[in-house]
Amino acid sequence: MIHTLKREQVIPAPLEKVWTYFADPRNLNELTPPDMNFEIVAGGDEAMYAGQIIEYRVEFVRGLRSLWLTEIAHVEPDRRFVDEQRVGPYRFWVHEHRFTPVVDGVRMNDQVTYAAPFGPLGDLVNALWIRRRLEGIFDYRTRKIVELFGGAA
């Protein structure tokens, strides 16, 4: 089964500043909860571009590190980018980030479309754990963005 997680946040900063921050893969570490032991292994040392492959190690479950290989599949500077999992913990993962100038700064919309591994068992695990874990990760990111740029969570 395909699942979707959507988030929206207004960031009180100029579009150029917001885009520059999110276009730097190295900032992912700052936006990821510390308990995930997130580490960029390769491919994240330059500004984002279409076709860029980034290799991470991440700990979704305590003590169990996982390889996560993503491709920056689409980039429209100052508007949107899409990362897609090529190898990793999900059966399917596409994360679209959209940036829209608004009166108060930039409205950032995220849409994650994903499928858990293991078919019906994965859907049960999603209902019991994965969905809440993803929401917690995005809650953390929302708070970090407020710390970095101001605004409300």
Image (tube, helix red, strand yellow):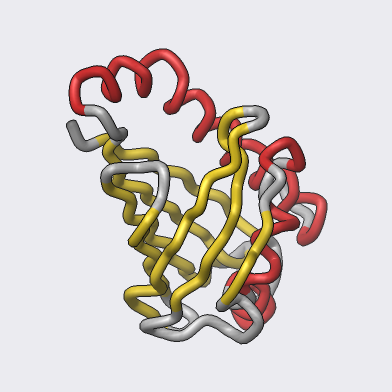
Is 143 drawn above or below residue 85 in the view shown? above
Residue 26 in the image: state x and y as whole percent.
69, 70
Is 120 drawn above or below residue 27 in the view shown? above
132 horizontally vs 116: left or right: right
**Split into 4 quadrants, where in the image is the N terminus?**
top left
Q: Residue at x 69, y 62 (%)?
A: 12
**Viewer-nearest residue: 13 or 45:** 45
Residue 151 in the image: state x and y as whole percent.
73, 51
**Split into 4 quadrants, where in the image is the C terminus?**
top right
Q: Residue at x 59, y 73 (%)?
A: 42
Quadrant position of residue 120: top left
Q: Residue at x 41, y 42 (%)?
A: 89
16 horizontally vs 119: left or right: right
**Viewer-nearest residue: 67 or 35:** 67
**Viewer-nearest residue: 102 or 145:** 145
Is 30 drawn above or below residue 133 in the view shown? below
Quadrant position of residue 121: top left
Is 73 drawn above or below residue 5 in the view shown? below
Residue 72 in the image: state x and y as whole percent.
41, 73
